[in-house]
Image (spheres, rainbow, N blue to C red):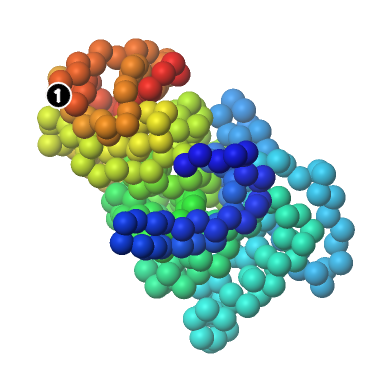
Amino acid sequence: MDLPAPLARGKYVSVRLETAEGSIGQALVRAFSFFPITSYSNPDTRLEFSFDPQPFHVKCQPAASKKVIDLKSLPAQSAWYLFSCPNCTDEDQCKPWGTSAVEIIKRAQETYRLDPSRPNHTHVCEAYKERAYFIYGEVCDIMFINPYEVVFHDRDPSRNGYFAGLGKLACEPRPLMTIQEAFARGQGAPFISPEQVRLGVYYQVVEGVKGISYYSKNQYTKYPALEQEIGRINRELQAIKAYLKIGEPFAGLAVASRPEVLAKSIVAGDRGLVVILINTGYRTAIRDEKRETTFSPQENFTVEVAVPGWLEIKQAVEIGPETRPVQLQKKKGKIIIPVDRIELTKILLLTAGGT
């Protein structure tokens, strides 16, 4: 789509999709470009763990508080956090589902009047989430969700990816951002493992989420292995966030020759695509109040990528502790990439130009 000039941040834009058969869809969205890598509740902006240098969530103060907000002091890359857990609020107050939308819309109007360039978001928690996403998914500019399938329900991290896909369906074309669990549920409860956090993040990223926040209750700072793994994950995400911001998942483009390896692709317009590999050969058991995840590395396989016709891939690199070029072979509109070894996840960035 060619624009005469870049859209001003925060501007409302009506987008309509036209085909030969006529208009098939229209939505009102706001212009902004974010992929926050941050924490939820207590801001974590430590650069040594590759968090964004400023917090993303700006708490909305209802007008009744009379609190004066210095807009110039707010981080540039941030959004108004209008309301927490409207689904639980409706349930706790024995009100019909959707009642909290009245207050959310009121706060959205208030913040837009004061600060028209900054988007807003709400946070839909994990209670009754299958229903709640579709009730509150279109109330704000951004929807945050926290599936918490591992810590709350002792399920596989892939379930967080399933609910990220469901949430995206509920709120699109508005962006979905997710809150990754990084804590133990209570005293004596097992901690989520570093490997489960890694898997949980990437199972959600491949669904097309536009940002990751970690919820920890400040606990991961007391679990060095988890804290270090979050830093490694963040460094990887920072390296590809420019592509994730504009990218959309495309099913079926990437296939690994080993069935144990899940291959997912995110196409970033005409800039390239991100291929994320997930090794599904893992198991988790609880020992000493912690979840421990073991896995079998996968070795010596290939990944085949069907490249969309408008893309001409010129370079491929592997994103990790060090970014390194990878060998690729072009064959009948497809790219074949050999992979020598994968632990749990691997990121391949295929670009139409230099990285």
Foreground pick, 30 / 349: 30
Foreground pick, 128 / 23: 23
Foreground pick, 132 / 114: 114
Foreground pick, 91 / 306: 306
Quick check: 269 left or right of 62?
A: left
- Residue 279 rendering spot, x and y as whole percentages: 23, 35
Mark 1 residue element: loop
Disc 1 packing (10 Å; few <14; some 14–19; many ≥20): few
Residue 233 is drawn in which quadrant? top left
- Is residue 77 visible from the viewing direction of this image? yes
Residue 252 is drawn in which quadrant? top left
Residue 262, above or below 168? above
Q: Quadrant of the C terminus?
A: top left
Q: Residue at x 32, y 28 (%)?
A: 311
Q: Residue at x 51, y 66 (%)?
A: 138
- Residue 338 rendering spot, x and y as whole percentages: 19, 18
Residue 286, above or below 28? above
Quick check: 132 left or right of 314?
A: right
Kind of residue at badge 1: Lys
- Residue 91 rendering spot, x and y as whole percentages: 51, 80
- Residue 276 rendering spot, x and y as whole percentages: 31, 33
Q: Which residue is mark 1?
A: 332
Quick check: 260 left or right of 11?
A: left
- Is residue 347 visible from the viewing direction of this image? no
Q: Residue at x 60, y 39 (%)?
A: 4
Q: Residue at x 41, y 36 (%)?
A: 269
